[in-house]
Amino acid sequence: MTASTLSRFEVTDVSPRIGCTIEADKETLLSGAKVQEIREILERRGVIVFPEINLSDEEQIAFTHTLGIFAHEEGEGNGDKDVVYPITMDETINPIASYLKGAFFWHLDGTMSDKPILASIMSAHALASEGGETEFCNTYAAWDDLPDGEKADLEKLKVVHSVWRSQLYWKPEPSYAEIKQWQGRGSNTLPLVWKHRSGRQSLVLGATAQQIEGLSFAESEALLVRLRDWATQPQFVYRHEWKLGDMVIWDNTGTMHRAMPYAMDSGRLMHRTKLEGEEAFA
């Protein structure tokens, strides 16, 4: 591990290729004085953990605003009101909790949009007694380490993404009404390899990836699974074991993530805010 000090920050890498912790006080975070440093670290490391920082909902919303444009949750009926989104399997807290079961599989958020969210910010308010960790993988590093001879072919490929594909992971035999509802969210065709304006490139994979254009279903599935397995090798992955009050930010444009299994009645509760996307898939 390496450590450096940025003003009132103490930054420590948690693995060689992805993730770091930042020890800081609330006042520093909420002041906005370190926004540029945080954003640079986020792009470089992919995941930032603020251990047991214990921000209130109001403080988390304010901190989100310091980093960029606050992204409102689609279809939540809150209009332009800034609120945290409850990540829980308790339908008395989140009526569409079942939809979140897709989060147990590797994915990135926003594949139905041409400009996905920049980042998610999530705080731990209640933990499962067992399980419930969150894993992240670095899709920049996964691309960088692919054999050069394979990259040219992959750069040409387009992939159709859909919500219904991701929902089939947790419910492979849905009712007709369910599949029609999921398919109502539409689909989106994206490049397999995202060429970022920074010059970096990353793989665009995950549970919403339905079919590679120009390949048979069998060929497409084999390649998507092979690339997912490649991108989620241990050297590209950080697993966060939550403590109450932890806050984690991840770069949605250069990582995938998934929740590890936990009991549906565990009471696990995370509060999430998001940053609007700043760059379209290209």
Image (spheres, helix red, strand yellow):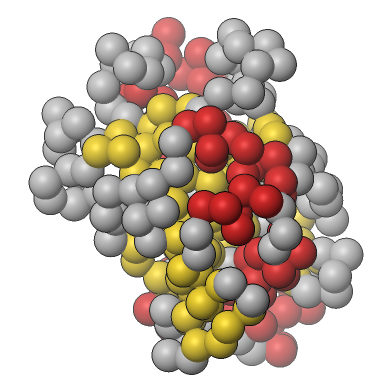
Q: Is residue 244 above or below residue 186?
A: below
Q: Quadrant of the C terminus?
A: bottom right
Q: Nearer the viewer, residue 25 or 165?
A: 25
Residue placed furthest toward the front: 27
Q: Is residue 60 above or below residue 258?
A: above
Q: Residue at x 63, y 23 (%)?
A: 82
Q: Residue at x 57, y 61 (%)?
A: 255
Residue 179 placement (x, y as % from top left): 46, 18
Q: Residue at x 40, y 70 (%)?
A: 238
Q: Nearer the viewer, residue 65 or 211?
A: 65
Residue 18 placement (x, y as % from top left): 51, 75
Q: Can residue 188 be seen here?
A: no
Tag count: 0
Q: Can residue 32 be seen here?
A: yes
Q: Quadrant of the N terminus?
A: bottom left
Residue 89 placement (x, y as % from top left): 28, 27
Q: Residue at x 34, y 48 (%)?
A: 245
Residue 109 relative to residue 234: left or right: right
Indicate the quadrant where residue 152 lies: bottom right
Residue placed furthest toward the left: 129
Q: Is residue 23 above or below residue 75?
A: below
Indicate the quadrant where residue 172 lies: top left
Residue 150 placement (x, y as % from top left): 68, 82
Q: Nearer the viewer, residue 142 or 74?
A: 74
